[in-house]
Image (cartoon, grey):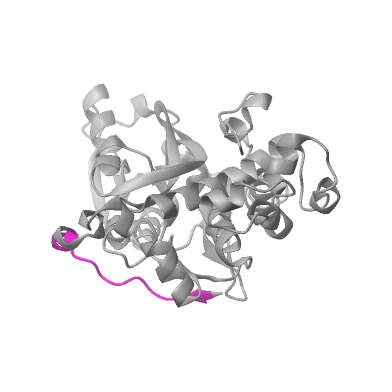
Amino acid sequence: MRMRQGKSILLAGLALALPILGSSAATAQSTLEAVKQRGHIICGASQGTVGFGAPDGQGYWRGLDVETCRAVAVAVFNDKDKVEFVPLSGQQRIPALQTGEIDMLPRTLTWTLRRDANGINFAAVNYYEFTGFMVPKSIGVTKVEDMAGASVCVQTGSTTEVVVNDVSTKHNLNLKTVIFDNVAATRQAFFSGRCDALITDAAALASVRATQAKNPDDYVIFPATPYMDALSVAVRHGDDRWYDIVKWSVQAMLAAEMFGITQANVEEMQESKDPRIMRFLGTEPGNGAALGLDEKFAYNIIKQLGNYGEVFDRNLGAGSPLKIERGPNRLFTDGGLMFPLAFQ
């Protein structure tokens, strides 16, 4: 496991972004080859959101986004620790991906049209969530319509800047944004009373409230809009092979849950005669070869990390300190939005 600090990246550098490389044939293996030569994946990470991405007391990175990146490391190297995490601010993260500083970005990144059209590809959704406001209970606000004139702590480079402006305009609230360039400063300003509200993904707010508030019961979280966001893993434009590897590594965890395959039973499930499970676990070859990976790449991911439900539970759900309800992140078979694709 490795960690290094993200470099300061100027937006003007976007003109040098890698997506404009030559033919797809020339770039199809570029990331995979670079990763293999380097011996590990470089993964963009948050600046510290427990449950999604943060180092524990021993410096080992944990969280839903972190394990998403580890799944790709397993697919490529059969080793979940062949990964380096680079903490990045909201403003740094997309340029870092576009310019090749990192190989993939699973850092609570909202899938939007303009991002998708400008240098990055969204490979897979790993979390569905609404954007929320967190406010002190003492101010007596429990819904957006009551926030007239409120100040809001916002991290620059995030979609929440747009959300605040949209909400303010729609409800004629005259909200006042207080902009910060990193996560720590944004949260510190809120808890010090510089802003009336903090805005980000609701699950991240729940994490912040549980881990950083002196008294979590002093704060309330409510939706900023009625809309759900798709938080997604992203890669650069122009590298279809890498895009496929990242996408199907995430899909492996979802498909395993649908098949009832867990970290505990994956060994015995190799004896299954169900053709779908045989293809999925690589006892019937073909899927691994199609991606340029080991035939047992999906088996290896589940053996080392477990299925999506297990990953969710230990990082965000009942098995974690956060106890976040799974909600829309349940499988479609259980009324959620997660829909595994076909491994064939």
Q: Nearer the viewer, residue 336 or 80?
A: 80
* Residue 282 within the magenta-colored segment of the rendering: no
State the residue in front, 5 or 241.
Answer: 241
Q: Identify which residue is drawn at 70% across, 35% down.
A: 258
- Is residue 330 placed above or below 308 in the rendered structure? above
Q: Is residue 295 left or right of residue 73?
A: right
Residue 328 point in image, percent of width and height: 57, 31
Q: From this viewpoint, is residue 36 visible?
A: yes
Q: Position of residue 136 (x, y in %)?
A: 45, 43
Q: Residue at x 63, y 65 (%)?
A: 78
- Give the residue drawn at x 28%, y 43%: 115
Q: Between 39 and 332, which is closer to the camera in this rendering?
A: 39
Expressed as whole percent of the image width and height from the top left, the position of residue 153 reads 32, 49
Picture quadrant where residue 97 is located: bottom left
Residue 29's spot in the image, x, y percent? 39, 60
Residue 11 versus residue 249 in the image, above or below: below
Establish if 112 lies above or below 263: above
Residue 198, visible in the rendered structure: no
Q: Residue at x 30, y 55 (%)?
A: 94
Q: Is residue 48 left or right of residue 288?
A: left
Q: Is residue 75 left or right of residue 113?
A: right
Q: Is residue 114 left or right of residue 203?
A: left
How many numbered discs sit on the rendered protein? 0
Is residue 4 on the magenta stretch? Answer: yes
Locate residue 331: give its quadrant.
Answer: top right
Image quarter (top left, top right, bottom left or bottom right) of the N terminus: bottom right
Pick the quarter of the image with the C terminus: top right
Q: Which residues are magenta?
A: 2-14
